[in-house]
Image (cartoon, rainbow, N blue to C red):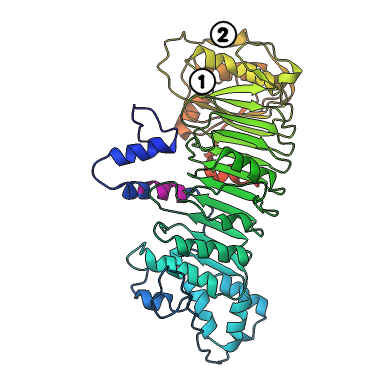
Amino acid sequence: MDAAGEEGDEFTTYDQVARFFNSLEGPSAQERIDGIIPFLVSLLPAPYVPAPEIESDSDDERFSLTSSESEASDDGAYHDPITAAPSDGEDRISRLPDTLLADIIHRLPTKDAGRTAALSTHWSRVWAGTPLLVDDAHLLGAGGTSGVPVVRALSRCVAAHPGSVRGVRITHVSFYAHEYALRRLVADLADKDVQDLILVNRPWPLDMPLPDDILRCASLDRLYLGVWRFPTTTAAHPPAFPDLRELGLFHSIVGYQELEALLAYCPKLEVLSIVMSYHDPSRFRLVSGSLKIAVDWMSSFDEVAVEDAPSLERLLFQSIGKRRPVKIVGAPRLEVLGVLDLDLHTLEIGGTVIEAGMNVRASNMVPSLKILAVKVQFACNMEAKMLPTLLKCFPHLETLHIMPIPSNSLDSVHDLRFWEHQGTCECLESHLETVIVHGSLTEGHGVGFIWYIMGEGKVFKTLSFVCSDEKARGFRESAEGRSGEVAICVVAPRWSFQAAIDSSLADPFCAL
């Protein structure tokens, strides 16, 4: 969110967001929040099945396979779903093994998958035994987000299916004023062992409560929640997510105790991301024996603290807002860190604040780290001086990403002599092989740092640029006589939210 707060600052709490939206003239607060939702949805994992082209059929025809023909309301009345009359026609496809037929059903949009039950008695049995996939994008008519009919269709679709639910993706619906349908839907998902759930609301106000039944969806493997107030957890009613591996909380209000409970009661959780959270929770504190990837994406935290995460391999940020500490206490397997913004982050390792030029002791080092991404203003003396100190903190660093940003600082220009006085360290002597520059370097600032790396790096092999070929070629020409056997090349950018949560990528910041 780019809008400024009441006093020109960026938002840090949901109260500020609400006051700001309510103070504006013109479009309603609901319309404004609808403008934020597409950005959040763009960060989500891809749909199970691409949405079909919008049809112009009526609401009744669109939903006849997943709901009753009679009008329903959200008052709690139950309507028996109509079972499509099978034709009992036979064809070659119907003779395929049921496992293949189930796979065909899974590859169809939600409406078309339901319609297979009308093909024959055999197809009807296969559909009933196939775990359900539901995507609200498949239920939209020509009018787009048609609201109430879609809410009803979603609830009935899940309730009518006799088997389990494999996955549900809801990103187009506002559940405001349809709380009964929401409660019924979430309860049915829990009862039918939903494994994969993406549930994004489009509400106003922002703090619409998520039903407590979400806490008993014990079969979940992946869960993404967007724009909700997470339910309160207690010792008597803790979350029951024994198999959850991936959790994303988008623009949601989550209490500090609730976040701690989620980590404590998710023994298999490997990926945790918090996106656009405004001070709820106020701290991103990691205590988890299973967590491998933690992502803070455009959230406002007072601090990020890795206190006890023995399996954590990646700690990743796309930070906004005010300056905050990043504390690393217990992360013996941490291999990837970034983007560490030297203007926004104060790094603490082992209880010690890392400062430029300090004497780095063993207790201030993270020897497991292999990849570091740093955003730096080279024209700012304090930030430039932090780079050699960081290299000492990560003695086994192999890949360094430098993201230079412009600065209006009036600090003196750093020439090569400035960097020559920094000396060497274990990282440069034995491990650092690759530096990737994301953007342009200015003569006398970042360029001097690159000359320093080339001069001191005993195993330095590759200097890559995430920029145009022309800029890289210009640097290659200026480096003649200095680069020796160092290869200078251009690489493709990769840094995105999806790259951050993808453990299969060797480097989330660029494609080498």
Q: Of all residues shown, which one is farthest toward the front?
A: 236
Where is residue 510? Give x, y as percent.
57, 38
- Please determine whether, in this image, residue 395 is positioned above or below residue 238: above
Three-letter code for the amino acid on which mark 2 is drawn = Phe
Dot 1: element: helix
- Please determine whether, in this image, residue 500 is positioned above or below residue 65: above
Magenta segment: 35-41
Looking at the image, is mark 1 or mark 2 earlier in the sequence?
2
Q: Of all residues shown, which one is farthest toward the left?
A: 26
Three-letter code for the amino acid on which mark 1 is drawn = Ser
Residue depicted at 58% across the width and 53% down the height: 223
Number of dots carrying numbers: 2
Dot 2: element: helix
**Residue 53 visible at all:** no
Where is residue 144? Give x, y as percent.
35, 63
**Which secondary structure dominates the residues rendered in magenta?**
helix
- Residue 482's quadrant in the figure? top right
Marks 1/2: CA–CA distance:
19 Å
Q: Mark 1 — residue? A: 478
**Horizontal side, residue 461 vs residue 438: left or right:** right
- Residue 303's quadrant in the figure? top right
Q: Mark 2 — residue? A: 418
